[in-house]
Image: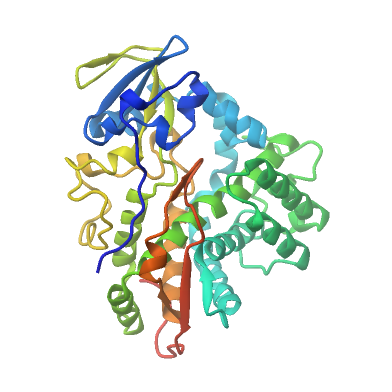
């Protein structure tokens, strides 16, 4: 069965114009040269600066993973993060950034990941209850709502599932009603959400190893990695956004794809109900989702050392725009790259050949700390949902879906699906194994 997989219509370099670095930073169809889909580097100059767009797999592995210290985020990245959240992990660099990463590390370690398993299960069951009686559902909104539930319990909560209060539900609804392109309005509601956490006294029930538990303390939190109250607040907003924006977006794409492959969906459901493991199959599904629609379609880096890429010598001080979106769609690397293939990653482990590596969560010093959480959430939640509903996506509606570019690769319209309830299976666990 053919699956609709929307893509961008990138323009040739000759039709691409940049007047400032802001034009390059903004991910748009007309700011990423189409040549990246078949060559590894494109050079331009903007405002007197050398800028290199990169889709070469070896160069990207060096920049993002093996030598990431010499290719830090460009100052523009931090300015954007600071404007959005304030002095959070996204808006600081150097010692301040490392101190914050150290302070929040317990939220992403092995014990926290184990605590997340029952949170995922309970949040998915709550979603099933909300969706019951809905013949048609906007998967974009519903998946983001589910991801918010998990973030509210794990990072802005006690680490076990807690149902949102009426006040928080109202804030969730406001947040989900805002177009994702309106970041200013989203940030306003996220601030209200964090304020509600403090007003309701929820911060008092957070685990002691969660720095957000000290958000009400004028002195912030101490210890080996002290944080000011302002830093705690900024990171609380950041965590509220990231989960629903990126993981929720990926979950929506995955459920939408499953709605277009009923045979594959049915086989997953049947295997799960028979007690067979489906984790590998779901991981393969979401690797393909992340290949085509990576949460971070590109990443701006600054060269601190010389790097040779396909005949180009990138000198220290140059800006490098790493382009995972283009790498993931290069025909010389991925057979039939624009086709969604649910079996493309079947039977492979997490270590791919270097040239076929995907970079949905960056790497090295700037790897997303919540990567393992995102994988666990996507797999376990999907396993529950497909055992509760048969998801169907109409081919004529799917063919109309395009991409809306910005901080993420969002669909340009709601991802609509029909839900048909399935009688619960009382003989087996609903967890992916």
In this view, the residue in front, 224 or 361, is 361
Q: Is residue 54 left or right of residue 152?
A: left
Q: How is the image coloured?
A: rainbow
Establish if 214 lies above or below 318.
Answer: below
Establish if 327 lies above or below 413.
Answer: above
Establish if 426 lies above or below 92.
Answer: below
Q: Is residue 427 left or right of residue 194?
A: left
Q: Position of residue 30 (x, y in %)?
A: 41, 33
Establish if 320 lies above or below 284.
Answer: above
In this view, the residue in front, 311 or 62, is 311
Would residue 421 be visible to someone looking at this image? Answer: yes
Total numbered labels: 0
Which quadrant is home to the N terminus?
A: bottom left
Residue 423, located in which quarter of the rendered image? bottom left
Q: Residue at x 42, y 23 (%)?
A: 17
Q: Position of residue 332 (x, y in %)?
A: 16, 40
Q: Is residue 333 left or right of residue 67?
A: left
Q: Position of residue 386 (x, y in %)?
A: 42, 76
In this view, the residue in front, 385 or 121, is 385
Q: Position of residue 349 (x, y in %)?
A: 24, 55
Which quadrant is home to the C terminus?
A: bottom left
Q: Residue at x 35, y 15 (%)?
A: 305
Q: Residue at x 68, y 60 (%)?
A: 172
Would residue 73 be visible to someone looking at this image? Answer: no
In this view, the residue in front, 33 or 343, is 33
Q: Residue at x 43, y 39 (%)?
A: 367
């Amino acid at each position: 069965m053919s699956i609709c997989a929307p893509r961008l219509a990138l323009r040739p370099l000759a039709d691409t114009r940049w007047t400032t670095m802001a034009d390059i930073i903004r991910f748009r169809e007309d700011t990423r040269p189409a040549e990246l889909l078949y060559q590894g580097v494109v050079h331009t100059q903007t405002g007197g600066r050398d800028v290199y767009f990169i889709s070469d797999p070896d160069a990207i592995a060096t920049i993002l993973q093996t030598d990431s210290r010499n290719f830090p985020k460009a100052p523009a990245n931090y300015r954007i993060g600071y404007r959005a959240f304030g002095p959070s992990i996204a808006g600081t660099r150097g010692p301040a950034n490392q101190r914050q990463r150290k302070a929040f590390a317990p939220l992403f370690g092995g014990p926290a990941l184990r605590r997340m398993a029952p949170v995922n299960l309970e949040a998915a069951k709550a979603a099933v209850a909300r969706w019951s009686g809905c013949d048609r559902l906007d998967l974009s909104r519903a998946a983001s709502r589910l991801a918010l539930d998990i973030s509210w319990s794990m990072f802005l909560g006690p680490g076990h599932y807690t149902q949102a209060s009426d006040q928080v539900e109202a804030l969730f609804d406001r947040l989900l009603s805002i177009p994702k392109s309106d970041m200013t309005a989203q940030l306003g509601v996220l601030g209200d959400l964090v304020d509600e956490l403090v007003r309701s006294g929820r911060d008092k029930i957070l685990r002691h190893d969660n720095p957000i538990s000290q958000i009400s303390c004028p002195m912030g939190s101490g210890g080996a990695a002290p944080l000011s109250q302002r830093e705690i607040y900024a990171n609380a907003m950041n965590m509220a956004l990231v989960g629903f924006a990126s993981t929720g977006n990926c979950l929506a794409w995955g459920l939408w794809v499953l709605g277009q492959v009923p045979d594959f969906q049915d086989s997953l459901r049947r295997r799960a109900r028979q007690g067979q493991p489906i984790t590998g199959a779901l991981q393969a599904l979401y690797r393909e989702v992340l290949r085509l629609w990576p949460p971070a379609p590109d990443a701006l880096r600054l060269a601190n050392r010389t790097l040779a890429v396909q005949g180009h010598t990138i000198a220290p001080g140059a800006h490098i725009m790493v382009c995972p979106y283009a790498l993931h769609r290069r025909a010389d690397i991925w057979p039939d790259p624009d086709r969604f293939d649910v079996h493309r990653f079947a039977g492979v482990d997490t270590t791919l050949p270097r040239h076929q590596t995907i970079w949905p969560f960056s790497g090295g010093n700037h790897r997303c700390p919540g990567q393992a959480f995102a994988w666990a959430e996507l797999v376990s939640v999907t396993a529950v949902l497909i055992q509760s509903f048969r998801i169907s996506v109409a081919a004529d509606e799917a063919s109309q879906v395009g991409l809306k570019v910005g901080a993420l690769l969002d669909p340009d319209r709601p991802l609509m699906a029909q839900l048909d309830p399935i009688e619960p299976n009382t003989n087996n666990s609903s967890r992916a194994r």
